[in-house]
Image (tube, rainbow, N blue to C red):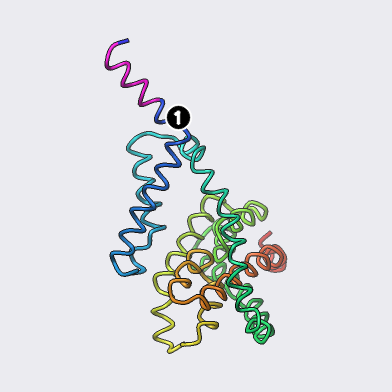
Amino acid sequence: MNSQQKLDAIWQLIQSSPLTGLLLTLSIYSLAAYLYKKSNHNPIVNPVIISIATIIIILLITGISYQDYFAGASLVHFLLGPAVVALAVPLFQQLHRIKKLLLPITITLICSVFIGSLSVIYISDWLGASLATQISLAPKSTSTPVAMGISENIGGIVSLTAGLATATGVIGAILGTKVFSLMKLKDDSVRGIAMGLTSHGIGTARAFQVSDRMGAFSGLAMAITAFTTAFLLPWILTFIGLI
């Protein structure tokens, strides 16, 4: 075997190794998080969107397939579950305030699911989007894994829903606190609920950077929105005749 053949064999091993996806994900996100910290947590330098864009570019340049990449990155995907469960800790610390706000939280949640899904469906219809696109847009305010599951079951385009849900979270994380400042909203409970209802996990990560209370309420809103949307959205789409 000559030198070129040895290099080709090493490159093929790197491309197919599960460790490549894991190391690539951790190293790129660490670098993005460092840039985010250096920018004084400027939401425009969001580490999630920077990591996604960078990894896509690297995969395209190197020719590493998504399946080979995800074989290693699936460990990070698996850890999302325990990370979500860990949100129960700050929620428990805010339990006394959650009990006081249970009724307004419930009403806001139900209104959010109806208004969020119906508004995006009718606006996209008005702009000429196809039926499949309208259905794919409907669960965009829930966390990405849940949105993908909902989209798959109601006939949406799963990959489109995943991209839209991620974009929704990133936009909410970037603009959310600025909107709250313009509206002069100072109660972290209210700001957290609004962030979690609209921007799911990415918005919740941003909320925790503002305060533990805002993050806890955002996590609560994110979790209940995912559950309620999965329960109500098929019924809403059936009622308006889309499925």
In the image, 111 versus 68, the foreground residue is 68
Q: Residues within 10 Å of mark 1 (few under 14, many from 20)?
A: some
Residue at the (34%, 56%) spot, across then down: 32
Image coords of residue 95 (percent x, y): 65, 79
For residue 145, above or below residue 70 = below
The residue furthest top is: 1
Residue at the (50%, 75%) spot, across then down: 212
Image coords of residue 45 (percent x, y): 33, 63
In the image, 23 versus 113, the foreground residue is 23
> In terms of secondary structure, where does tag 1 sit?
helix
Q: Amino acid at mark 1?
A: Ser
In the image, 214 versus 164, the foreground residue is 214
Q: Main secondary structure of the magenta part?
A: helix
Specify whether residue 187 is painted magenta: no
* Quadrant location, the C terminus: bottom right
Residue at the (54%, 72%) spot, across then down: 196
- Name the image quarter holding residue 43: bottom left
The residue furthest bottom is: 184
Q: Is residue 5 left or right of residue 207?
A: left
Image coords of residue 99 (percent x, y): 68, 83
For residue 24, above or below residue 94 = above
Image coords of residue 34 (percent x, y): 32, 58
Q: Is residue 70 left or right of residue 11?
A: right
For residue 61, above or below residue 125 = above
The part of the chain drawn in magenta is: 2-12
Query: Residue tagged by mark 1?
Result: 16
* Quadrant location, the N terminus: top left
Q: Is residue 205 left or right of residue 230?
A: left
